[in-house]
Image: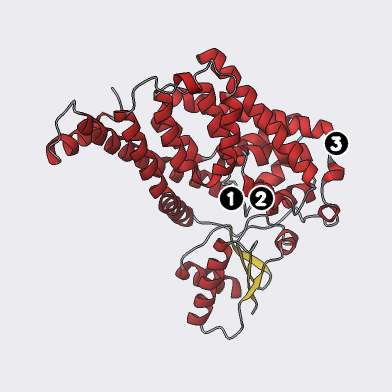
């Protein structure tokens, strides 16, 4: 289980990181949420929008900040 | 019939009915003018941003890149400019967009067309133009904005400036085919609603202050007051407006209502349009950020071409519209 937030380091991305940490905590996911500000990694995933929420290396949410509930749903959808 | 007539009635009712200001008095007219403009702008903002967000959820930058990578130069420039309209732009998204385009093989000229159009023709500026200046000026702004971004891209392509892009940009090749997470209809609507609220939250203060000062100018400063300083006969009006516009980027929402009031007082339309284009298209923070991926010389070329385009547009409209 690997949850990553990728962004350019702008305030929007940091906010997604904070909300995702909260979502992971509420889902009782023990692993730390990773925060990556290397833009090239976003590009290597084939994406150009930031921020990105990736679960196990796959983009789950791209380009906007959703509510905690939506992040939880996105994480659960991508685990199975 | 004027679509906004009910709002005018509402504004009059508040100004003359609730606040008991005398109609035709300066204070009464200013308050009614303020309420009318504020209500109209916020309704327009909510509706238009919502619609644009829905369209955008179908056309994320990743899809746009896919479209642009296969187009030849001229068609690519036009498409890039058109697609730039619906893409929101903040200085933090400039780098990933630039890298993503160039690494996927989108020509540099096409990429620049996109980089000019995306901030210049944005929905907040458009709504303010539409609400405060009317649809003719708004259309004029869109068309001249499109022409400037298409031509800037073509000129940059002709200059063969690839060597002025930082070499690391070309070292990785972006993976062009990615499976984006699918969005349901409901998710698109939620996204559009959240995005609209987000933008409104960001700009409402500036708009209130801008329209507030505008209403004051409207009521208290004599018409034609500015003609002798900024009328169409003054050659320096346009370049000066463009220079002043460069550092004002983040406050486009507050500046446009102000400019609309100044136009009433004698600033010519070409100068006004050039000023607004400079506010949106030439932004200091964006230039600073672009330094990460290109040499300063290329940024100067880019700013110079777009700036000249805007100045030329300003002069043309001053000639045509007087």
Q: Position of residue B48 (x, y in %)?
A: 43, 40
Label 3 sits on residue: B160
Q: Position of residue B140 (x, y in %)?
A: 53, 24
- For label 3, the crowd category at 10 Å Cα-Cα, with few meaning under 14, some 14 to 19 and many 20 or more, is few
Label 1 sits on residue: B90
Secondary structure state at the residue bearing disc 3: loop
- For label 2, the crowd category at 10 Å Cα-Cα, with few meaning under 14, some 14 to 19 and many 20 or more, is many
Quarter of the image with the N terminus of chain B is top left
Chain ID of residue with mark 1: B
Chain ID of residue with mark 3: B
Left or right of residue B118: residue B74: right
For marks 2 and 3, the one nearer the N-term is: 2
Give the Cα distance between marks 1 and 2.
7 Å
Q: Position of residue B89 (x, y in %)?
A: 59, 47
- The answer to whether residue B268 shows anywhere in this view is no
Q: Position of residue A63 (x, y in %)?
A: 58, 57
x 41%, y 50%: residue: B200
Label 2 sits on residue: B94
x 14%, y 31%: residue: B22
> What mark, if any, has residue B319 been given in the picture?
none
Give the Cα distance between marks 2 and 3.
21 Å
Left or right of residue B9: residue B103: right
Tags 1 and 2 touching, CB below 8 Å: yes
Give the Cα distance between marks 1 and 3.
27 Å
């Amino acid at each position: 289980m690997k949850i990553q937030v990728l962004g350019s380091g702008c305030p929007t991305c940091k906010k997604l990181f904070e909300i995702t940490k909260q979502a992971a905590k509420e889902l009782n996911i023990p692993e730390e949420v990773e925060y990556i500000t290397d833009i090239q990694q976003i590009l290597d995933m084939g994406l150009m929008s930031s921020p990105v929420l990736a679960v196990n290396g796959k983009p789950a949410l791209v380009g906007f900040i959703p509510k905690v509930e939506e992040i939880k749903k996105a994480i659960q959808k991508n685990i199975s | 019939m004027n679509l906004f007539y009910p709002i005018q009635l509402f504004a009059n009712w508040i100004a003359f009915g609730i606040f008991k200001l005398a109609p035709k008095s300066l204070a009464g007219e200013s308050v009614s003018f303020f309420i009318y403009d504020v209500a109209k702008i916020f309704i327009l903002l909510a509706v238009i941003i919502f619609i644009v967000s829905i369209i955008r959820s179908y056309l994320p930058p990743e899809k746009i890149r896919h479209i642009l990578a296969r187009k030849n130069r001229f068609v690519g420039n036009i498409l890039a400019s058109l697609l730039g309209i619906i893409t929101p732009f903040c200085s933090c998204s400039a780098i990933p967009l630039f890298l993503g385009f160039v690494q996927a093989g989108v020509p540099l000229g096409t990429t620049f067309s996109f980089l000019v159009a995306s901030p210049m023709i944005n929905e907040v500026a458009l709504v303010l133009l539409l609400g405060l200046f009317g649809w003719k000026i708004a259309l004029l702004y869109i068309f001249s904005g499109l022409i400037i971004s298409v031509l800037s891209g073509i000129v940059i392509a002709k200059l063969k400036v690839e060597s002025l892009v930082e070499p690391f940009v070309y070292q990785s090749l972006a993976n062009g085919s990615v499976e984006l997470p699918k969005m349901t209809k409901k998710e698109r609507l939620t996204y559009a609603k959240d995005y609209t609220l987000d933008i409104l939250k960001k700009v409402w203060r500036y708009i209130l202050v801008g329209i507030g000062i505008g209403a004051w100018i409207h009521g208290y400063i004599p018409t034609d007051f500015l003609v002798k300083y900024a009328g169409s006969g003054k050659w320096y009006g346009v370049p000066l407006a463009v220079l002043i516009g460069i550092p004002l980027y983040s406050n486009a929402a507050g500046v446009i209502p102000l400019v609309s009031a100044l136009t009433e007082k004698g600033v010519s339309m070409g100068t006004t349009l050039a000023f607004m284009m400079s506010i949106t298209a030439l932004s200091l923070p964006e230039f600073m950020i672009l330094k990460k991926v290109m040499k300063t010389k290329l940024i100067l070329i880019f700013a110079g071409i777009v700036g000249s385009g805007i100045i030329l547009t300003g002069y043309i409209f001053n000639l045509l519209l007087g």
